[in-house]
Amino acid sequence: MKNENTVVCILNKNDGKNLETLEKKVKRINENFTTYLIDGNSTDKSKEIAENFGLNVLNFGELSRGESINECIIRFKEEFDYIIFTSSDGEENLDDIFKFENYFSKGADLVIASRLIGGGKFKSDSEIKWLHRKLYLKLITYLINKMFGGKLYDCWNGFRGFRLSCFDKIILNEKKYLVEAESTIKFLKNNFRVEEFPTVEYPRKYGNSSNTIISSGFGHLYLLFKEFFKK
């Protein structure tokens, strides 16, 4: 029997090859939750693969990551109590989706699958080339904790879930990869309850991330100070 309170959104852009490797896990999720592939005009076979898995598919065209997340929140806010975001790139342990419900049932408003909390694992632990991202994540998380009163380990992992009613008070404005840090900051500023649990991140098998450290790096610093001085 499906959980009627929670919707799962799998963000995708030309990650059909990676999605295909997740068949068993995705089908299990879809058996237990209403699940959508949120596609960004993929030119590969992502849509066909998702439909073969039994998923609902929403094509958001050329909307950016942040815009797609915001659109999901708007669309599903009246129908569901909670929303969980993950991706099709194979970096996230989709079995962990079943852990979110326990935290929501205990009152959490934002639940982050953390790669840096005890028991978690960042992909740089497997591939050293990602070490700079791990170090930068630690810095940004430290600053967010100091500036906004958090006690977090992983401020921007996109594998996260929200209580949808919180968005009566919060509007997300960031269009790209800053949206996760933005949501973390705004949930802390509104004194919503933020929880983390450990998760393991894997290096992707196919393709490359479009999240560049240069634009993301300076962007996070600008975001922090903009939100800090905003009432």
Image: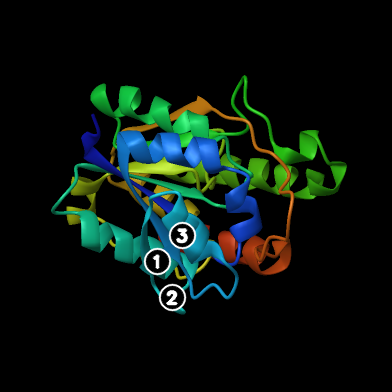
Who's the residue at 37% across and 30% down the image? 100
Q: Residue 194 carries which label?
A: none
Q: Which image quarter: residue 32?
A: top left
Mark 1 vs mark 3, CA separation in Å: 10 Å
| Placement of the C terminus among the 4 image quadrants | bottom left
Who's the residue at 66% across and 61% down the image? 217
Please, is residue 29 above or below residue 75 in the view? Answer: above
Mark 2 vs mark 1, CA separation in Å: 6 Å
Kindly identify the amino acid type of the residue bearing the numbered disc 3.
Val
Q: In the rendered image, which residue does mark 1 sit on?
A: 68
Q: Tell me whether the residue at label 1 lies in contact with that at label 3, contact meaning CB atoms closer than 8 angstroms.
A: no
Task: Indicate which label's residue lies in the foreground, 1 or 3.
Answer: 1
Kindly identify the amino acid type of the residue bearing the numbered disc 2.
Leu
Who's the residue at 43% across and 78% down the image? 61
Q: Position of residue 184 (x, y in %)?
A: 42, 47
The answer to which of marks 2 and 3 sits earlier in the sequence is 2
Q: Which of 53 and 136 is in front in this view?
A: 53
Q: Which of 41 and 119 is in front in this view?
A: 41
Q: In the rendered image, which residue does mark 2 sit on?
A: 63
Task: Indicate which label's residue lies in the foreground, 2 or 3.
Answer: 2
Q: Tell me whether the residue at label 2 lies in contact with that at label 1, contact meaning CB atoms closer than 8 angstroms.
A: yes
User: For the residue labelled by badge 1, is the local secondary structure a helix, a strand or a loop?
Assistant: helix
User: For the residue labelled by badge 2, is the local secondary structure a helix, a strand or a loop?
Assistant: loop
Q: Which mark is residue 179?
A: 3
Please, is residue 102 above or below residue 58 in the view? Answer: above
